[in-house]
Amino acid sequence: MTELRWLLLALVLFLVALPALSLGADTDTSPAWWAGLALVGVAGAIPIVLKFAPAGGGDEEG
């Protein structure tokens, strides 16, 4: 997966996580709240991991 696709995945996870957090907080549904919190953590970690991950690909000629 390219870096752009990883960042798009992070955006989608954030867009799913925020309504899940809201639903979990409003209706006092603990599993929805925890799932939203986990999604926020994963989505927030993706750009950090990409920052320190080696640039793969192997298509480069040196």
Image (cartoon, rainbow, N blue to C red):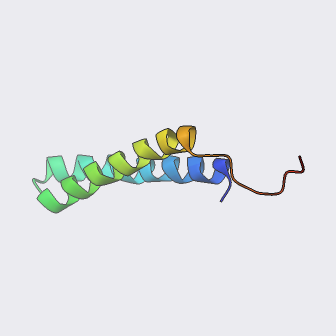
Relative to 10, say whether 58 is above or below. below
> At 15% across and 47% down in the image, what residue appears?
26
Residue ranking furthest to the front: 62
**Residue pictured at 42% horizontal, 44% vertical:** 45
Pick the front one: 60 or 2? 60
Name the image quarter holding the N terminus. bottom right
**How many discs mark residues in the rendered view?**
0
Residue 48, percent from left and from top: 48, 39
Left of 15 or right of it: where is 20?
left
Q: Is 60 located above or below residue 1 in the figure?
A: above
Farthest right residue in view: 61
The picture places residue 35, in percent across and down from the top left corner, at 26, 58
Q: Position of residue 28 (x, y in %)?
A: 9, 53
Where is residue 51? Give x, y as percent. Answer: 56, 37
Position of 57 with respect to 54 (left or right) is right
Which residue lies at the image location 12% right of the left edge and 57% below the top edge?
Answer: 30
Question: Of 39 and 18, which appears nearest the observer?
Answer: 39
Q: Residue at x 89, y 46 (%)?
A: 62
Towards the viewer: 7 or 61: 61
Q: Quadrant of residue 57?
A: bottom right
Q: Nearer the viewer, residue 30 or 27?
A: 30
